[in-house]
Image (cartoon, helix red, strand yellow):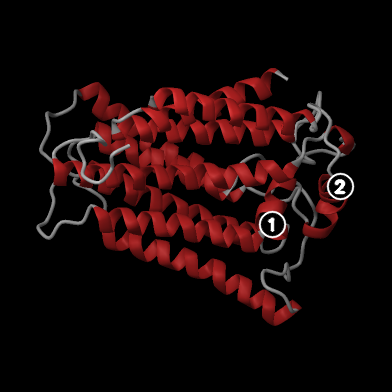
Amino acid sequence: MIYYIGAIGLIIIGLYIVLTKRNLIKIIIGLDLFETGIFILLICAGYVRGGTAPIFSEAGIDASLMVDPVPQALVLTAIVIGVATLALALSLAIRLYRHYGTLDMQKIRELKW
Amino acid sequence: MRRIISLVLLTIVLIGVAFCLDAIPFGISQSQVRQYYLDNGVKETGATNIVTSVVVNYRGFDTLGEVTVLFLAAIGLSAVLHRAEKRQRKEGRRSSLILYTGCRFLFPLILLFGTYIFIHGHLTPGGGFQGGAIIASGFLLTILGCWKWGGINKNAFKITESISGLVFVVVGLLGLLYSGYFLANYLPKGLPNNLFSAGIIPIIYVAIGFKVGTELTGVLDDLTKEP
């Protein structure tokens, strides 16, 4: 239960940062927090109490105590994709800074909110 | 005003998510897919790491899509940051002897560890994505610590990346040829818990490891060059 609360807390904090902050770097940090919260939420959904990793490394391991491998497979690719998209977002921020000389979203034209 | 609106919105999101999660009891996994993979995974794919068999075998096509997304992000980053004139890394202060020596000592060990992680992806925790990320972190160490290192050889990295992507697709297409569907596991599966087992899974994971490692290193190289 505490894991769910932590994951939802991260999601809410990230969403709040994305909605209210003006600085582009802070918005990107908020997106990353949001993403981390989603990863933790997915992993928690597949957790089995007292469970182990889904690896049959030796004979006689009880399969009923293994955690769900599907969310783990999803999250392991999503983390790497998350790093790459974060880098892409940062490069867009660099480009915007070069063009407008500021990272404030309200000073960048046509983005009023 | 903006804060109030966003707080109201967040409250709505919080209530919605809380109601959804109320239906999923924590600590009990009732998913039938999980049961199927755990019961039949080793028999059907030969890989003892069930996560790997899900990533590469059962959902291999999905992984090909994810690798493509990664590729597009790396390409987009170098396109966005591209400048016509040649960019140089600024000649910084020379790092101290301890940092320089330690960095040169650790770099091959980190590469070795990353390679170990992706070669043993079907037996132990780890795999192509994790091993590639470790290799990229080794290159990040040289970028930060050894100022003499003038940047990576872009062409060699591009060629490695293309070849490993091609290996993934060609292995998948051979599955179409031999067994009738894309990414079929047509090689002999061998004994579980051996290095040479699980058919095409190690080959694909090594290709993914090279691809992720070179792509993330290219991303780091683009981001650290002076504009």
- Residue position marked by numbered label 1 in the rendering: B196
Mark 2 or 1: the one toward you: 2
Chain of the residue under the numbered disc 2 shown in the image: B
Q: Residue reaching furthest bottom?
A: B177
From this viewpoint, is residue B153 visible?
no
| Contact check, label 2 and label 1, Cβ < 8 Å | no
**At which x and y percent is residue B194?**
73, 51
- Which amino acid is tagged 1? Phe
Residue at mark 2: B32
Q: Is residue B204 visible?
A: yes
- Judged left or right of residue A68, residue A31 is left
* Residue in view at x 49 percent, y 70 percent: B166
Indicate the amino acid at tag 2: Gln
The image shows residue B177 at horizontal and vertical percentages of 68, 82
Please tell me which residue is depicted at 75% across the width and 31% down the height of the picture. Answer: A47
The disc numbered 1 marks a residue on which chain?
B
SS for dot 1: loop
